[in-house]
Amino acid sequence: MPYRSPVSEYKFVLEHVVGFSDVSSTDTYAEATPDTVDAILTEVAKLADEVMAPLNRNGDLDPARLENGVVRTSKGFADGYKAMTEGGWLGLAATPEYGGMGLPQTLSCAVNDFFAASCMSLGLNPLLTQGHIEALEHHAPDWMKDLYLPKLISGEWSGTMNLTEPQAGSDVGALTSKAEPQGDGTYAISGQKIYISWGDHDFGGNICHLVLARLPDAAPGTKGISLFMVPKYIPNEDGSLGEANSLRVVSLEHKLGIHGSPTCVMEYDRATGWLVGEENKGMAAMFTMMNNARLGVGIQGIGIAEGAMQHAIAYAMDRKQGRTPLDGTPEGTGTILDHADVRRMVATMKADTFAARAIALACGVGIDMTAATGDKAWTARAAFLTPIAKAFGTEVGMRVSELGVQIHGGMGFIEETGAAQYSRDVRVTAIYEGTNGIQAMDMVARKMMDGGETANAIIDEIEATAEEARAKLPDLGEAVWQSAETLREATEWMTAQGELNERFAGAVPYLMGFARVLGAHYHLKAALAEGDNGPRTRLARFYITRLLPEHIGHLAHATCGAEDLYALTTDELTA
Amino acid sequence: MPYRSPVSEYKFVLEHVVGFSDVSSTDTYAEATPDTVDAILTEVAKLADEVMAPLNRNGDLDPARLENGVVRTSKGFADGYKAMTEGGWLGLAATPEYGGMGLPQTLSCAVNDFFAASCMSLGLNPLLTQGHIEALEHHAPDWMKDLYLPKLISGEWSGTMNLTEPQAGSDVGALTSKAEPQGDGTYAISGQKIYISWGDHDFGGNICHLVLARLPDAAPGTKGISLFMVPKYIPNEDGSLGEANSLRVVSLEHKLGIHGSPTCVMEYDRATGWLVGEENKGMAAMFTMMNNARLGVGIQGIGIAEGAMQHAIAYAMDRKQGRTPLDGTPEGTGTILDHADVRRMVATMKADTFAARAIALACGVGIDMTAATGDKAWTARAAFLTPIAKAFGTEVGMRVSELGVQIHGGMGFIEETGAAQYSRDVRVTAIYEGTNGIQAMDMVARKMMDGGETANAIIDEIEATAEEARAKLPDLGEAVWQSAETLREATEWMTAQGELNERFAGAVPYLMGFARVLGAHYHLKAALAEGDNGPRTRLARFYITRLLPEHIGHLAHATCGAEDLYALTTDELTA
């Protein structure tokens, strides 16, 4: 049973759970009608299911490799990439001015979900280009937009982001790459960058690197960082490729997963670059790209969860072991799916994937409403939901793919089944684009600088849904309401901490607790949207009675403060 | 900073936490004095640290391979194995009658812990031989003991267990391998077995397979299974190796982890075997071996947790990123260890590894006290703790190694650092020797057939410790007492369910909740053993305030019953 993109699930969540009609009611996104959404999801699904999914295993077994300084990609990847670009999917959310479809980001989420599920290592390539496009749309000078955007949007060229250096990972401000003005509007870029996903490939066209570097005499830290466009080939004015730039791939990393995605060490040796945005404002420009990418990475986690779930269910429906309680009943399948513990695992996968996806799509709706309305409340909501979508989506990706391995039993540990690949591939999503710890710190610091206003607005919304549920599903409504109250108390505790480190000490469990409760909210919305006590209600009941109670542990952990962490001395911790 | 076996940690836990003095006070184990324990731990640590740890990476990179039907092991493994046998460690707990040291199983736990931490793939070999030895000690006829045990105990020969067949995994009763009596006391064994760890190697000597098979006309299911000794070479009466038996390695599995451990598909084609134990009582004999192995596998998880923790701490102590709250203070290291979120992760690793190890060693003490006293309460206690030690130990191994990767940030995803290897290697421990789901089902069914007597005796013990703590550490005592009460309620719910499937529906979360509370108990004991509010108390406080609250979510999940799992129809689950 091969992977099938969850088209009808998307349609349900968009329509009934995350309020996508708000987006399609705006002038900006008036074209995103239900018919258009349906047509797009169906087409992307076809590409993912039929073209990309068959490449996934091969990308793992036949990794990208460096040959004479050039990256050779896994067999079939070039054709897969071509199929992606032919559909125009890279430019789905890009501006029509440069050839994009101008559709909502929320629909890009579907694209990235289906691509990650079917072949994450290849799907990572357009995800980066999408962020690249957005950074240019917001910060590039017009000439650069005119020259680069049509090619990036069509996929003829691809884009990367170059932040990390060996000594500058989570601490981006420690980077030392240099940019020297050449007096002709260009800069000479020098330095080494690591972890550059898709830093090179053999798909043809140009590879456009957005590189963070320092001007001479720039301030230390993040305030002295500027962003530059550094293409592999210097483009001519007509967009044809000119001479090779002074940059190279030094080596490829040997990684736990996504073997098909070349992770490059890049060296820039007085390479020609052009400024993107203002001098010393590179971090702001980069954050445009990163926020997009953070949601995209959360979606990768969700896509992998979907892929791993389908894969495990197919195995469970085929594997027979022992007697089950359903043997001899009309419902019985005679397979391990009928064992209570396997059902528990499958239902957990399903319920958590739904919760994470709803959160991510709600974030997407927030981004689209921000773009369409400029409303500050939407901006704040999208910004608040981004770290949750990223960290919870990737956490769910890890947990669900781990359950997928477990359902396979011994076969899960054997690479040939492919179950282990999901758990290897997804592991990086909790790390890149800011580790989940960084996401959580962003959430409790920057995203709560409003004194908790945005957090509490979301909690209000959860409680309103819980109240609404009291008539039809009183037990579920009550449980969700109670959990929202606990979340509100934890939120009050967080915002009361003047010392950020007190918040950081519980940031990750706070984020996870918030996500648990928010996930219950969306399950409840799904149940309420259903006419009677149907499948959505049963899954909501499963989540709310079995998984939601985890928020108690998370939020108790979240509000302990930093004192006990530092009472443990370094000697004790490292003894 | 290379791996260092935690000798002083072992001494503390044995002396102050799990009551090892009960064991050394018995006649049977009178030799296990503190001095002897110290000497053994020190010697094993030396072997693990100096000989085995340097082999670990190579075992991953240079997997065992099959060449012309013979397994060639990773470079250095044969020397490592020789060093293990020279220390006599395989026979540490084996009977002195055949050359063993006759020391407690609890000390074997230390051996397996240090071996797993330093090189799990090689350390798995003696773990299997130990189970093999124990099965023979209990069930083999005297001639077989005389012939095999001295060689197995010295490590000259090694042992395997052959249960699984393609259609018979968790459902062992479905196996179809055949055993035909030959009229001369031997049996012709035929069939294919899979997942046979260390089914072959090039360390020399004999490889002794304990094989489950069916006699002609045997009853279906587990009641028709018998156990046979099927050696690779038929031994002569003097113990020298005779002709090759009719068995072969068909292939090796390509696995997610423990690449250095050859996982064989074995084929027996009328191979000569001898009955071990009684006809059709093979499962009982196999369970002797499996119970030993289950504790051993839990210990593997704990060893990996220890290794991953030390590895991550060394990285954290070396990696500098950003400003920390300790900068400029005498305590400050200037490294990421001083960030609150990294401290949270390191403290979690430390606290959970302690908890899992204490539970496993308490299980070991139960096994030793059973052997020394024959007391039924000890027997029941050991049997009850075995699935917890296995499932929680391996769960902690997975969680801690995952945190280890996370602490490494981007480097965690790069295979060269070795962080990812821990998480790949440990993954199998939640699967083999009975998946963690099987462990949990064993716990709530077989191990609670006493109506919860053993469970409640342990809960009584937890509450007694909590009461004892009320004077010195009142907040911790109260928290542990409350958690024990919640556990008691969940236990009452479990035992009240006549339908086993109602229990199975919450078995895994029940086991995890039980372990969380039991871990708090041992942390509290450690804190009480400490003279003042020292490191043990601080770590206990961390565990009890931050991790213990997870039991609420687990136990709420545990007591939901099966109805909601089956209300979700197959169509809904697989849609």
Image (cartoon, coloured by chain):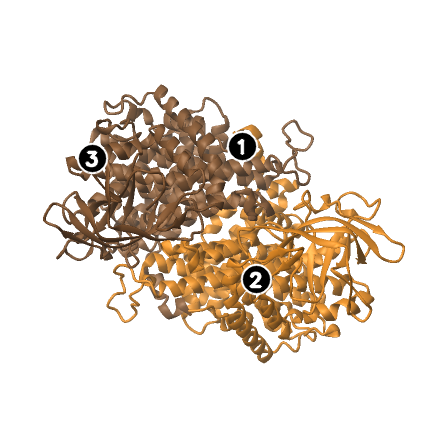
Chain colours: A orange, B brown
Q: Which subunit holds the residue at mark 2?
A: A
| Mark-to-mark CA distance, 3 and 2 | 55 Å
Residue drawn at 51 percent across, 63 percent down: A56
Q: Write down the chain letter for disc 3.
A: B
Mark-to-mark CA distance, 1 and 3: 49 Å
Tag 3's secondary structure? helix
> Horizontal and vertical percent for residue B566?
33, 64
Please, what is the three-letter code of the amino acid marked with disc 2?
A: Ser
Q: Are marks 3 and 2 on the same chain?
A: no
- In the image, what residue type sits under mark 3? Leu
Is B433 above or below relative to A142?
Answer: above
Name the residue carrying label 2.
A74
Which numbered tag is attached to residue B147? 3
Q: Which residue is at the front of the view, B442 or A417?
A: A417
Q: Residue at x 40, y 69 (%)?
A: B572
| Residue A30 visible somewhere in the drawing | yes
The residue nearer to you, when weighing B476 against B267, is B267
Asked whether residue B480 appears in the rendered view, the answer is no
Q: Is residue A185 left or right of residue A484?
A: right
- Sooner in the amino-acid sequence: mark 2 or mark 1: 2
Q: Mark 2 or mark 1, which is nearer to you?
A: 2
Q: Nearer the viewer, residue A78 or B117?
A: A78
Which residue is at the front of the view, B252 or B530?
B252
Q: Secondary structure at mark 1?
A: helix
Amino acid type of the residue tagged 1 in the rendering: Leu
Q: Is residue B218 left or right of residue A71?
A: left
- Residue, disc 1: A573
Whether A349 is drawn above or below B571: the answer is: above
Residues at marks 1 and 3 touching, judged by CB atoms closer than 8 Å: no
Q: Which of label 1 and label 3 is nearer to you?
A: 3
Q: Position of residue B351 (x, y in %)?
A: 47, 36
